Amino acid sequence: MPKSLGVIWLLFVIRGAFYCQLIPLWEGYDEWGHYAFIEHLRLYHGSLPRTSDGVSEEIHQSVESAFIKHEAAEPLKLFEAQQPPLYYWILSAPNRILLNQPMPIRIYWLRLLSILIASLVIPFAYLAAIQLFYSRAIALSVCALIAVMPELMIDIARIGNESLAIAIASWLIWLLLGRSKGLTMGVALGLGLLTKAYFLAFLPILILRRRFTSLAVAIAIGGWWYARNFRLTGTLTGEIMDVAAKNLGWSAKLAAFPKVHWLSAIDTALWTHIWNGAWSFYTVKSWMYRVFEVIFAVVLIMVIYALLRAPWGRFKRKLALLLSLEALFIAGISYQTVTIYLSKGISFTPGWYFYALIVAEALLLASGMLILAGRKRVLKAMGVLIGLFAALDVYSAVFVLARHYKH
């Protein structure tokens, strides 16, 4: 791999360390809930928690005295027990090592470890881009684009299983674009299924491509978790909103679908994907969101336009695969939007979840730039896009987050 890739990778980690320091304790999305899972594994000798379990007194006092206090129902419950266990198993070992350190020190080092895990997105993005473009220059621009996205940093500079999910999903996308053997892809997907339930969206891709060996290996590794969920909750995912809506049945869910205010749901998905100020939901200027929304729309139009034109070759088949992954993921998150509506009566879509497919997104953005600007000018077009995200990163970190957290 080129030295410049190592530089991008290092800068990614440095930016992550900065965000770990910038974001106050428990300001990360559901961070105390994720840490409570890790602590439960330590306190109860590795036994898996349930969502009805309480949190430790240390965590409770820390949440109550946090620099930025968010409303939480009393008594505090271990709601993140809904999550598959792999990430928490991995972080439970360093958590034991750091046990004698004050909690803020423990959280910082576990955040930094999460950044290091998520940083694997950079080499996987490079390998995937080589598979798609056969160009080192374009591949490096894809990595640079990922490295400057500010909301990605906010998503992973916390204790939370998104960091591992992003790394594994990036690995899977590279394998899907290449010619990986069934065992490797099955292991990757199996580990994904033990990290986040949204990896279920990859299953139809393997079925359609007749990768039955990969499918069998994945189910052998991760299937037990979903069988456990069904036994305990009557749902496949075990996700709290899904469990809350279970008794309503599929007819009620289908009836709720047209009642969701989908324009609002899409708007919140874009807003919380482009930039959202962590659990305080700070925002930047509205026109800044519009700039990126226009870029996304133009790229999507260009990619679809290219796919509709003949002939179909290797490049277009891989573009179709990336779009299919995004579509399946959107379908899964849309189902969650319906369950949120049924449970809370709001039309909301958490856009930060889409960073699991950040490699697919970056490859589609680069493909749109290639189609729009041509191979001779694609690097300049990518440079503009990288510059826009870098400007958003600096503005949001200095003039929004730092200003609010200072007070």
Image (cartoon, rainbow, N blue to C red):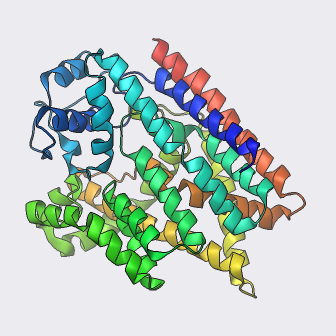
Residue 346 image offset from top left, x and y in percent: 31, 51
Along the line of sight, which residue is nearer the eye, 286 or 135?
135
Furthest-right residue in view?
Answer: 376
Which residue corresponds to the image point at 12% horizontal and 30% vertical from the top-left?
74
State which quarter of the image contains the C terminus: top left
Along the line of sight, which residue is nearer the eye, 133 or 349?
133
Is 353 displayed left or right of 75 in the figure? Answer: right
Along the line of sight, which residue is nearer the eye, 372 or 116?
116
Question: Can residue 281 be seen in the rendering of this structure?
Answer: no
Query: For the image shown, how many numbered marks are present on the structure?
Result: 0
Say if 309 sits above or below 124 in the image.
Answer: below
Which residue corresponds to the image point at 40% horizontal and 75% vertical from the top-left?
214
Residue 76 lies in quadrant? top left
Along the line of sight, which residue is nearer the eye, 24 or 115?
115
Is 324 displayed left or right of 281 in the figure? Answer: right
Residue 30 image offset from top left, x and y in percent: 31, 37
Residue 136 lies in quadrant? bottom right
Say if 77 sits above or below 258 in the image.
Answer: above
Which residue corresponds to the image point at 38% horizontal and 74% vertical from the top-left?
203
Residue 298 image offset from top left, x and y in percent: 70, 61
Which residue corresponds to the image point at 58% horizontal and 55% vertical from the top-left?
124
